[in-house]
Amino acid sequence: MAFPCLDALETRTSTLLTRNARARGSSSGPEPSYTSGGHQTFTSTRALHLDWGGSLPSYRIAYETWGTLNSDASNAVLLHTGLSASSHAHSTAANPAAGWWEKFIGDGEEYALDTSRFFVVCTNVIGGCYGSTGPSSIDPATATTSSSRVASDGGKGTGEGEGKRYATRFPIVTLEDMVRAQFALLDHLGVRKLHASVGSSMGGMQSLAAGVLFPDRVGRLVSISGCARSHPYSIAMRFVQRQVLMSDPNWRRGDYYTSIPPHIGMKLAREIATVTYRSGPEWEQRFSRRRADASQPPALCPDFLIETYLDHAGEKWCLEYDANSLLYISKAMDLFDLSRSVQDAAAARRRARAGRSDGDDGGDASKCTLTLPEEAYTEQEGEEQLLKVDGEGGAGEINNSTRRPPQDLVDGLVNLRDHRVLVIGVASDILFPAWQQREVADALQLAGNERGVTHVELGEDVSLFGHDTFLLDTQNVGGLVGRFLQE
């Protein structure tokens, strides 16, 4: 039996090996294939103290803007990205390629973000690889004097003598850390208060965090297919992606920047992610059980149309994004929880870090004391009750839609009690199920926001695109956002 899918992986490995061999003869080193251009860069020389005790002595944020900031700087909209998106949400003169929200942004009230009315700002998050400081950036602690000025170069200068990339020496970051860095950029741009904070998926989480952290600097909020705290299913799916990636021998515990990147692990991780981004009903209609070539005998390589779709998604993405950025940002999503106790604990760690000397980085990954359990997890007493619905004794699914949000989460959202908030969920979303957006809306109302919350759930009669609906549905998602911002 032939294995063309494995042949393709081996061919790419050989190509990368040859490319890197040539690059070793260059003074600049191999340039990562995922770097992008056309953005502006904000550099902060003020240390960013992080939620888990680490610190970035300086950092850069790549950003792009559309529209014009008005005279009193009151029309700014901060657009937050999903996990792997760059700042390029819409085409610009500097980068005419279509952006990831191209059809949602434009000149006119028919767009979700009307650039004739709003000044739209989108950034690549801290920890990313599209121009902002992340694991692929030079670690200032290893940089020479001559190269220290580009210490946080977003993954560019890597020549010999310039220092080493952070790799997995990069400190653990949270979505809240990313938001704080974004607000430093807003200070630089002269934006004291946003008209709105808007985001989908991870961006929907960041959007809520922006309001919680800076309630006086955000007018209204939009959270699409997001949550106020990560839940076990999505954590599990991201964990599996990280495990697949870290099991690729080419990952080398994060130290792959001068060798072959872990493209096989990245491809498989993307295939797993793609399963969570769309929905079974959509694929039933789109692919059914059709094979790519029914005239051929079955193959172990991609054979069914759905398999070729997943294979293409992985192939397209495996060299477009930094593997370490995927690890760090997906972990930041897992850690996300706006509960009051979590916020207080993070604030205490930041205060402790700010009181240490610059050379004492409590967030150093080498100091991790995590130990794995000696025995597998076993069911705990009383957990059989999880199989019961509403205490009636019948086996079935947990009815999350009728659960009251925990008081700790309600307390954590009190800062949003006076804001107008639009929360959008999608019934076909399996990664961020619609009950998670209902939890956000319910928690906001319990926190005292009884009239300012608008919650909309798009049913399967409207969209079968699952989690990716926010990227595709300009009529419903775009229409809701546009009307909400213009009211």
Image (spheres, rainbow, N blue to C red):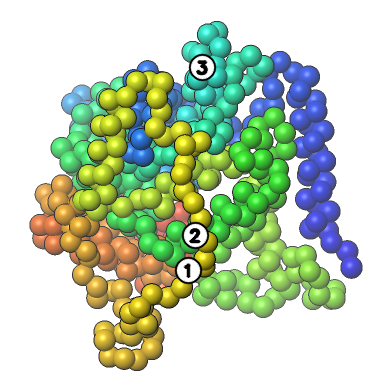
Instruction: Report the Cα–Cα distance between label 3 and label 1.
Output: 46 Å
| Residue 72 in the image, given as x and y percentages of width and height | 18, 26
Residue matched to label 2 = 373
Indicate which disc residue 356 carries. Answer: none
Q: Which residue is mark 3?
A: 150
**Label 2 to label 1, Cα distance in Å?**
8 Å
Q: Residues within 10 Å of mark 2 (few under 14, many from 20)?
A: few
Provide residue 92's location: percent of width, then percent of height.
Answer: 48, 32
Number of callouts: 3
Q: Amino acid at mark 3?
A: Val
Tag of residue 377: 1
Q: In the structure shown, which secondary structural element does the residue marked by tag 3 occupy?
A: helix
Query: Marks 2 and 1: CB-CB under 8 Å?
Result: yes
Say above or below: 195 vs 227. Answer: above
Spatial CA distance of label 3 from label 2 is 42 Å
Looking at the rendered structure, the kind of residue marked 1 is Tyr
Please indicate, yes or no, whether residue 238 appears anywhere in the rendered image.
Answer: yes
Residue drawn at (54%, 16%) of the image: 143
Residue drawn at (80%, 56%) of the image: 6
Whether residue 280 sits left or right of residue 353 in the image: it is: right
Residue closest to the far right: 1
Q: Secondary structure at mark 1?
A: loop
Residue 163 spot, x, y in % from top left: 59, 19
Disc 3 + disc 2, Cβ < 8 Å? no
Q: Quadrant of the N terminus?
A: bottom right
Q: Nearer the viewer, mark 3 or mark 2?
A: 2
Task: Name the residue furthest top.
Answer: 146
Helix, strand or loop under label 2:
loop
